[in-house]
Image (spheres, rainbow, N blue to C red):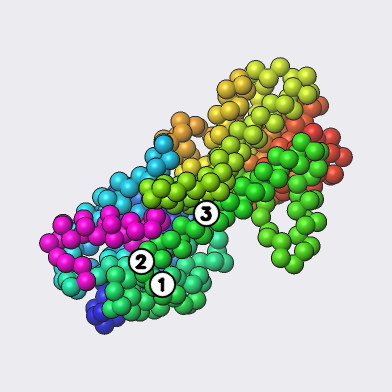
Amino acid sequence: MTTRNQVKIAVIGLGYVGLPLAHAFSKQFEVTGFDISAHKIEQYKAGIDVTAEIGNEKLAASSIKFTSDISDIRSCNFYIVAVPTPINKDKTPNLEPLKAATRSVAGLLNKGDYVVYESTVYPGLTEEFCLPMLEKGSGLKCGEDFKIGYSPERINPGDKVHAFENITKVVSGCDNEALVGIAEIYTAVVRAGVYKASSIRVAEAAKVIENAQRDINIAFVNELSLIFNKLGISTKEVLEAAGTKWNFLNFTPGLVGGHCIGVDPYYLAYKAESIGHRPEVIMSGRRINDEMGKYVAENAVKMLIHQDKKVKNTNALILGFTFKENVPDIRNTKVVDIYSKLLEYGVNVDIYDPVADSDAMALEYGIIPIDAIPEAKYDAVIYAVPHDAFSSMTMDEISNMYRGKSKIFLDVKNRFNRTNMQKSGFMYWAL
């Protein structure tokens, strides 16, 4: 590896993973950040952090060179690919962003360069899918002319405690020289240190099972909530009681969306099926979690019927639309399933989310959120995403949203006290 002052890093893909990555490396290295979205690049240049991960002030003060022109990273020698790895409608991996990024990098490679992938993939994909494109596009030989590696991203959007520098970084390389060189670069910026995986495939597998594990555990408590709701037991109270045991795992029911936990298990399942194994536990968890949005909507409809409401043309308000609290990202949000199912029943639905990217909502889902919550309009309110922006809402303010004495309130994340809500006249339901 070249000396530190000779290392020029290019980060390809500047979303929730790439931007914090570029910002961290820019404190120690010369960094150029590339993204295909010219609009996003212009915002970054203006000091506007559309991800809300870094913050406008820190972004404006950073030394990152931003560009949407791929030729601007030609002088770099350490390429980090952090593009999205989504799924198709049939739940198979959509590798188009990764393919496009790899081909772009291949056209820039020189002898001695490094390419590190951070995008979540299935075991074997870096060497089986990306490496041949790099060699073909560059005319160079991996191991002899350039090095590749894999270092799985562990960014948790909205989490300011477990930031990039504070999380142990798994690194891997195509050979020992690559592993040492990649570890050296990451060690320079990751305070928590690095873990050297024995191979690229091990590092890829480690990443994909991190999210699959969370997905399965959340599916388990989601299934418990289905059971306990039928039994008339509070899931929250059951989990609190069970949580007094020292080794009980702390998971809570909820909607599992986003571009990690709700997507990555399908990559592992795809690879498993390609080698002749049907991943029963993984897919069972996915089926449960994928149905939770519809389940919430159906319970809202049942509550409307219980209150003798004619469901068609009743009014419902959904508070929050993003895939998790305090982040503007609406990709793969499961709140849209609540919205769509209510529309199927003929319910008029408004969405209020002061955090969400409203332009992205309109573009991806055709939904225009309301700018302010009107008074005395709704028959049901669904508290879907517990943004900090909602934390100051009082019961009186929530009561003023309803147009009648019947106040149906669905608390998806179980953030309100059931007893207090019922004493205040709400017909309360929670997962």
Q: CA distance from mark 2 to mark 3?
A: 19 Å
- Three-letter amino acid code at the position of disc 3: Ala
The extreme bottom residue here reads 3
Picture coordinates of residue 396 (x, y %)? 78, 39
What separation in Å lies between label 1 and label 2 (alpha carbons)? 7 Å
Camera-side residue of 280 and 18: 280
Name above or below for residue 312 compared with residue 65: above
Pinpoint residue 83: horizontal percent, then vertical percent. Answer: 35, 54
Q: Which residue is mark 1?
A: 197
Amino acid beneath label 2: Ile
Residue 342 occupies quadrant? top right
**Which residue was labeled with disc 2?**
200
**Residue at coordinates 49% horizontally, 32% vertically from top-left?**
367
Q: Which badge, 3 or 1, comes first in the chain's sequence?
A: 1
Mark 1 vs 2: CB contact within 8 A? yes
Q: Which residues are magenta?
A: 117-143
* Residue 272 visible in the current orientation: yes
According to the image, label 3 marks what residue?
Answer: 212
Q: Quadrant of residue 49?
A: bottom left
Q: Is residue 177 magenta?
A: no
Q: Height in image: 387 above or below 31?
A: above
- Rendered residue at 49%/58% (across/down): 209
Residue 269 in picture, x, y percent from top left: 45, 48
